Image (cartoon, rainbow, N blue to C red):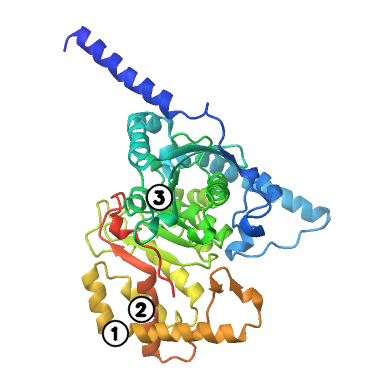
């Protein structure tokens, strides 16, 4: 190639880059919605379960400490000797705290959220611009700039299907999509619900694409908070018609939203884990284990399972059978089909069922569901299900009769929430071991669905399904 041709090609590339950067950057646009624009009450005078302005001003609430089931804080020590011991303990912990902070704000953030790296955003800029243009041209997408309570600006895209909801009325429901650690709404997980016919609201994590800030858990939750408020109060979707969809690390923001706004209609988690610690320990040197655990707990405490158990509504878990990202097996290559025993989605299901149906998941129930989770294909599932002769009609009748009996008593109004009878349910007490196994398998199959795909493969529209409701 001659020098002149090379210079012309270089100028052409820079023209494409500068044009994309000019169109993509929304920071000069006016703000469309702020976190503090929420009125005291929603339509009909009923206030949605949102955070107060005072709470949001200090940053949204995150589960930590005793709320996670850890030990309660000890009584404060008294006396000069106790204060000296406390000071000495703080001095001893200072080097570890500094090392943890340094790791979290450098290599740690890039590993947990690689999509926030400046070079990655710039490299993907033309593709992100093309994705935006496709959403606007094909689906009449509306881009909006939201401001969270921490001052971060969140880039969003809304596709409205309410005017043409389809024969099944899917367009009347809004799916809020929470992307993975290297995902952007311009080319991310929102394609599945969008092609399935739902109204969709996509947003980018802080520091991703057109969003500002850094993607630490508190900032991510702040962003999720303003996105939910925008959906409820500006787009005017009823809470019962809002579905939150989280893919991979987006499961943290998704479970935080449904925990904080329990009246939201449903939750779908795709290729999500229960806790970040096992996955972080897997990819880091073994000698760093203590520092890695401390860094995750203090700076990236993505406790998805804890937050999931605090949502009382319908839940659908999607487990990808070829997923090696949320697996702790240590395989250097993608896992063969059916090898799903170390998928962290298994722990997510077990935690959910143990919380909601403790009597069913005792002894035989827990053991049979753990064995069922080893089935990595639909054929294996069907064979396992047939082996134990699960009677779906009997299981449904038992659950409905339990709910009806609680409804007849209804002594404690606090036991009823936006989705009916609150969890945990004590159904299953006194069942025979055989019946307990059948009910446990029925519940597991209703809450988890296998998808034969790798972690980063786009989800097919037909695989995006709303959760089961009793």
- Residue that label 1 marks: 388
Task: Provide residue 305's location: percent of width, then percent of height.
Answer: 48, 62
Task: Provide residue 232's location: percent of width, then percent of height.
Answer: 55, 52
Task: Provide residue 280's location: percent of width, then percent of height.
Answer: 43, 51
Residue found 59% across the figure and 57% down from its top: 63
Left or right placement of residue 159 versus residue 410 in this view: left
The answer to which image quadrant residue 150 occupies is top right
Q: Are marks 1 and 3 in contact (CB under 8 Å)?
A: no
Rate crowding at label 3 as few (under 14), some (14 to 19) or many (20 or more) other CA atoms within 10 Å.
Answer: many
Helix, strand or loop status at disc 3:
loop
Extreme residue toward the top, this view: 4
Left or right placement of residue 74 versus residue 288 in this view: right
Real-space CA distance between mark 2 and mark 3, rounded to the nearest whole angstrom: 36 Å
Q: What mark, if any, has residue 441 been given in the picture?
A: 2
Q: Are marks 2 and 1 in contact (CB under 8 Å)?
A: yes
Rate crowding at label 2 as few (under 14), some (14 to 19) or many (20 or more) other CA atoms within 10 Å.
Answer: many
Mark in the foreground, 2 or 3: 3
Q: Are marks 2 and 3 in contact (CB under 8 Å)?
A: no
Helix, strand or loop status at disc 1:
loop
The C terminus appears in which quarter of the rendering?
Answer: bottom left
The answer to which image quadrant residue 157 occupies is top left
Mark in the foreground, 1 or 3: 3
Helix, strand or loop status at disc 2:
helix
Say above or below: 33 vs 450.
above
- Residue that label 3 marks: 161
Real-space CA distance between mark 2 and mark 1, rounded to the nearest whole angstrom: 9 Å
Residue found 30% across the figure and 59% down from its top: 463
Say above or below: 152 vs 230.
above
């Amino acid at each position: 190639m001659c020098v002149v041709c090379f210079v012309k090609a270089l100028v052409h590339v820079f023209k494409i880059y500068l044009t994309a950067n000019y169109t993509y950057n929304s920071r000069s646009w006016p703000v469309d919605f702020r976190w503090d624009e929420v009125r005291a009450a929603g339509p009909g005078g009923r206030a949605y379960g949102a955070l107060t302005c005072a709470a949001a001003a200090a940053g949204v609430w995150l589960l930590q400490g005793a709320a996670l089931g850890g030990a309660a804080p000890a009584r404060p020590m008294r006396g000069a000797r106790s204060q000296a011991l406390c000071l000495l303990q703080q001095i001893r912990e200072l080097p570890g705290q500094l090392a943890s902070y340094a790791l979290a704000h450098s290599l740690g953030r890039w590993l947990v959220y690689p999509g926030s790296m400046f070079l990655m955003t710039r490299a993907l800029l033309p593709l992100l611009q093309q994705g935006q243009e496709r959403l606007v041209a094909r689906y009449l997408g509306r881009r909006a700039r939201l401001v969270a309570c921490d001052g971060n600006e969140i880039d969003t895209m809304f596709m409205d299907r309410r005017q043409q909801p389809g024969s099944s009325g899917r367009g009347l429901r809004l799916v809020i999509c929470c992307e993975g650690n290297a995902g952007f709404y311009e080319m991310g997980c929102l394609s599945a619900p969008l092609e399935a016919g739902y109204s969709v609201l996509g947003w980018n994590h802080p520091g991703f694409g057109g969003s500002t800030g850094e993607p630490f858990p508190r900032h991510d939750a702040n962003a999720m908070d303003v996105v939910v408020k925008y959906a409820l109060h500006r787009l005017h979707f009823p809470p019962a018609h809002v579905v939150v969809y989280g893919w991979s690390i987006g499961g943290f923001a998704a479970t935080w939203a449904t925990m904080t706004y329990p009246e939201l209609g449903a939750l779908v988690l795709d290729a999500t884990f229960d806790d970040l610690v096992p996955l972080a320990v897997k990819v880091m040197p073994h000698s760093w284990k203590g520092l890695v655990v401390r860094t995750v707990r203090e700076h990236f405490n993505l406790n998805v399972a804890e937050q999931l158990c605090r949502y009382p509504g319908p839940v659908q878990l999607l487990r990808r059978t070829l997923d090696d990202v949320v697996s702790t097996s240590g395989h250097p290559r993608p896992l063969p089909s059916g090898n799903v025993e170390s998928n962290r989605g298994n722990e997510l299901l077990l935690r959910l069922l143990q919380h909601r149906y403790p009597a069913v998941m005792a002894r035989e129930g827990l053991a049979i569901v753990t064995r069922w989770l080893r089935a990595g294909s639909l054929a294996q599932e069907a064979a396992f299900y047939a082996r134990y002769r699960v009677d779906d009609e009997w299981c449904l009748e038992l659950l409905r009769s339990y709910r009806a009996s609680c409804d007849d008593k209804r002594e404690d109004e606090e036991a009823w929430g936006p989705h009916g009878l609150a969890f945990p349910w004590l159904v299953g007490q006194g069942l025979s071991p055989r019946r307990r196994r059948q009910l446990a398998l029925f519940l597991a199959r209703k809450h988890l669905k296998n998808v034969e795909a790798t972690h980063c493969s786009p989800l097919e529209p037909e695989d995006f399904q709303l959760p089961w409701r009793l």
